Image (cartoon, rainbow, N blue to C red):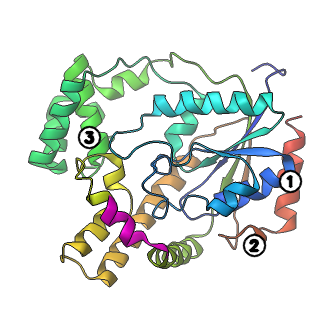
Amino acid sequence: MSAENPPALLLAGPTASGKSALALRLARRLGGVVINADSMQVYRELRVLTARPSPEEEALVPHALYGVHPAASAASVAWWREEALGTMEQARAEGRLPILCGGTGLYFSALTRGLSSMPTIPDEVREEARALLEREGPPAMHARLLAEDPRSAVRLRPGDSQRLARAWEVLRATGRGIAEWQAEAPSTGPAPYAFRAIRLDPPRDILRAAIAARWEAMIRAGAVEEVRALLAQRLNPSLPAMRAHGVPEISAMLSGWLTAEEAGRRACLAIGQYTKRQATWFRHHELAPCWTHIINARIEHEAQFSESQIDEILSLMKLLH
């Protein structure tokens, strides 16, 4: 990548690792724009459950791509990439540093490595896949996919309804598996920026405690009311927003299937399992030539990052200018 490419910072890590607090602190110190790189925080109906930055935090520094997509449709990686590139270009024009903050590895990969030339899926094929998923359930769809496209199926969990439906619709529309498409050289190429990356990786016990504390805070902040409003839209249950962490559990609680305590226990367990997958993904994918790894002992609030950690990050930033 050319030395003349403008700088951009990637701030990655698992859910509840303190990314947003650190992004805010860095943006205030460096004159940056915090750009969302989390696939759930794009949905406007899910401010509380996705722990989006508060209105007060958004007022301190520019934030972008938070709550900009309706839950009634799926936000694709390609859509996010185009939106992020436009926002980064605007930040560059304003003399601000783009700080992309999130836990969705595919978003970061699309930006730093590019996207494959996968064709557009017709609406009727997409609807057929969603209907099949709703009728038979994720395990049955996984079994179907395993029989017809084992290369793609073995990479997916039997309960991952969104990615199973996506794999099925790609196979039906193109005759080729999604794994085959993804193995091709990216057609878009990396974005023209000089990327540097920071990975937060708290110890598991601290992360579990942070997840539990965050859940309690979400409940107090109106998570149940948020899910009730989402359910009132009567959306397709296979949509990503309907599968966001906490939505299935609170939905079951509202239906009387779970107590509040059991819903919280299950939600925290699911989030904890997800953070393990996130951490594993980031450990095995180097997103930029310079990758600073921070094992932070305390998280959630910007003041809990030590000055030595901030100094280390600012030292990294000097490589970008």
Q: Which mark is residue 162?
A: none
Vertical placement of residue 315 versus 227, above or below? above
Could you tell me how far apart the alpha carbons at marks 2 and 1 are, in whole angstroms?
Answer: 16 Å
Q: Relative to 213, say whether 137 is above or below.
A: above
Q: Residue at x 72, y 47 (%)?
A: 62
Separation of marks 3 and 2 at Cα, in angstroms: 39 Å
Q: In which image quadrant can residue 76 be found?
A: top left
Q: Which residue is disc 3 drawn over?
A: 164
Q: Residues within 10 Å of mark 3 (few under 14, many from 20)?
A: many
User: Tag 2: residue type?
Assistant: Gln
| Badge 2 or badge 1: first in the primary sequence | 1
Residue 201 seen anywhere in this rendered image of the structure: yes
- In the picture, the quarter occupied by the N terminus is top right
Span shown in magenta: 221-229
Looking at the rendered structure, which numbered label has been put on residue 304? 2
Is residue 143 something one can see in this rendering?
A: no
139 horizontally vs 277: left or right: left
Amino acid type of disc 1?
Answer: Arg
- N-terminal-most mark, 3 or 2: 3
Residue at disc 3, secondary structure: helix
Front one among 65 and 136: 65
Closer to the eye: label 1 or 3: 1
Q: Main secondary structure of the magenta part?
A: helix
Asked if the stretch drawn in magenta spans residue 226, the answer is yes
Q: Residue at x 47, y 74 (%)?
A: 215
Q: Residues within 10 Å of mark 2 (few under 14, many from 20)?
A: some
Q: Nearer the viewer, residue 47 or 165?
A: 47
Q: Which of the two discs, 2 and 1, sits closer to the camera?
A: 1
Which residue, given by chain and number where applicable, does mark 1 sit on? 29
